[in-house]
Amino acid sequence: MLLPKKGNASTPIEVQRKQLPIYQAKAQLLNQLRQLQNAIIIGETGSGKTTQIPQYLYEAGIGRLGLVAITQPRRVAAISLAGRVAEEKRTQIGKLVGYTVRFEDVTSSETKLKFMTDGMLLREAIGDPLLLKYTVVVLDEAHERTVHTDVLFGVVKTAQRRRRELNKVPLKVIVMSATMDVDLFSEYFNKSPVLYLEGRQHPIQIYYTKQQQSDYLQAALVSIFQIHQEAPPAHDILVFMTGQEEIEALARTCRDISKHVPDGCGSMVVLPLYASLPPAQQLRVFQPAPKGCRKVILSTNIAETSVTISGIKYVIDTGMVKAKRFNPDSGLEVLAVQRVSKAQAWQRAGRAGREESGFCYRLYTEQEFDNFLPMTVPEIQRCNLAGVMLQLMALGIPDVMNFDFMSKPSPDAVRSAVDHLELLGAVERREGPVFLTPLGKKMASFPLEPRYAKTILLSPEYSCSEEILSIVSLLSVDTVLYNPPARRDDVLAARKKFTSSEGDHMTLLNIYRAFKKVSGNKEWCRENFVNSRNMGLVKDVQAQLRDICLKLNLKLESCGSDTSSVRRCLAHGMFLNAAELQLDGSYVALDTHQPVTIHPSSVLFQAKPAYVIFNELLHTSRCYMRDLCLVDADWLLEAAPEYFGRKLHLSKT
Ligand code: ADP
Ligand code: MG
């Protein structure tokens, strides 16, 4: 049975808009939204909430006195949705419809509908706590409960109240969610009404594995080709995985195998989808596959609810997700591959039944599923809160410990965050209350994690601000290097000339310097496996960070070839992320004594220096340190004599 694909690209966009489930509810919805100051809207993924509601508001003249902000947890969603809405409105992006994400602002004085990351709206609130630019704030994807959205709940609630008290133009707050569990939202916003959109969910057949799978990637591969051999080509497959590296690796394997499948099996296009994918490639997932060809999309949890892809009949759910995990005792935040919640698993399954009945293959047993957590724990309860605490204090929130959180973080986590900020010199405790120091105030002006902001602010002392700005920019942009495993030897040969025995930071800096020397020449980038687009972004980021430095009157100097001052500065700013080599050749993180390992991608993998600082921890089979820099023990002691002297017995090398 060959079913035609629905919503194909040739349907005019106006018709597509009217076919969305939300269109039926438009009049009623507008009627309600006109009257309500707070509303919660629930609707299945793909019903048209994100793309249509902002347009409906605009067309009906609701909130005309200001802008409509629509927040998204992910930058890629903000960018692609703004693009889609601009297309529907037949305008150029950046005019009526624009977007603002960290380091990128595509808006103008004409912009009325502004898609933005939740983190960006929070930053804007620092300069304008009442959010006076906006008449409507739509907090989208609220069910994801990112830490920024959670803090925004409190910020918009306060802004709304203050604006009422001050007789300013009222602020309308619309919370949108793809899941039904919204009691908490409604309760929080003074029992605001919940509007349900009629969904269009078709039945989905769920299959579990009979046995536990030790290798979910292998299991996914087998399932993809089983479906590929049995199902008609018009039925696309969506596979949920955890991250870029495994997605790219599986994509390659699929492409290789698909060349050798039996005749009559049809061909397949394999499309990755993850946050750091260049936008042009992201858009490919929305295009229908060529006739007779099957689309296989390998995606992170971004396809759970943030973006809707048509044509999906089969979902393969590995049951895994990469997410933050936090240990308040140590203050260390770890990215870990872990089980999804039941709610997430249901969202994933739901992607198979948008246009007609579908199938979901769960690569875990039913017993395993029974043991999944019912709901995803809000990020605010499992991340390092130092950055958020710094922002709240910069927002002038007097009593951070008692901020009106929808779900309170644990007191331990709050204390740990304050300790972290105190160690960085950003806050001071004066008999109980916590105050932002002048240094902390400066740190909050950077859209960066506190330790990076601190490192930048320290850099003039070491006369290496230019280098530190480059390094922080390089680390702020998703990977600037290509590492195609099939060409591993070529990559190694090309990298060799840049590799620094002092670590990954210095290696990246060498590559960046070479990139600038050839003015970003495309051919050079190809030969050296450098992602030219992301490198271009690094330059933009650096320019923005430099502007902030100039406003703060920092002296920007380059240390030239004296790389030890750069490493000294990094040691000073990042001392909380340091690790020490043990006699048996293993490493422990210095503040917790947690065992850690150098990630194989690091240039220091073989070298094993005595002391390193690292950027992040990634927990898969072991706890890996990623992006390392060689440092001296003395520098760490210098950076925080009391901390290391008291807590640790750092052996002088
Ligand atoms: P919701 O927010 O309720 O999940 P959306 O408004 O995001 O729904 O999506 C509604 C529809 O718009 C989707 O089903 C899809 O067909 C279409 N759409 C959204 N983004 C794009 C895009 N970038 N390209 C093509 N179609 C899109
Ligand atoms: Mg949406």
Image (tube, rainbow, N blue to C red):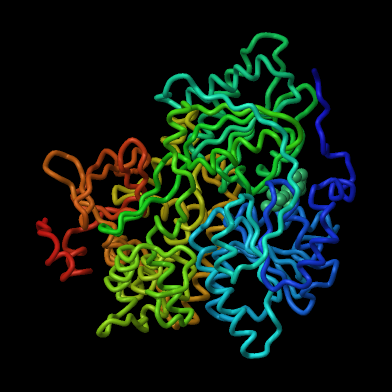
Quadrant the N terminus occupies: top right
Q: Quadrant of residue 338?
A: top left
Tell me if residue 444 can be seen: yes
Residue 243 visible within the image: no
Of the pair 406 and 56, the residue shown nearer to us: 406
Residue 178, given in percent of the width and then of the height, sits at: 64, 50
Is 25 positioned to the left or the right of 166 in the image?
right
Q: Nearer the viewer, residue 234 or 645?
A: 234
Q: Say which of 21 and 539 sits in front.
A: 21
Residue 68 position within the rendered picture, expressed as x and y whole percent measured from the top left: 72, 70
- Number of numbered discs overlaid on the protein picture: 0
Judge from the rendering whether residue 652 lies leftward or rightward of residue 336; answer left or right. Answer: left
Going 41% across and 71% down the picture, which residue do you hit?
389
Q: Is residue 207 above or below residue 261?
A: below
- Residue lying furthest bottom in this view? 166
Residue drawn at (89%, 47%), measured in percent from left and top?
15
Q: Which residue is painted at 74% across and 65% down in the image?
A: 94
Q: Is residue 487 above or below residue 623?
A: above
The residue positioned 49% from the left and 47% from the top of the image is: 375
Q: Quadrant of the C terminus?
A: bottom left
Residue 300: x, y in percent? 55, 41
Q: Looking at the picture, how far across and down is residue 267, in whole percent? A: 70, 20
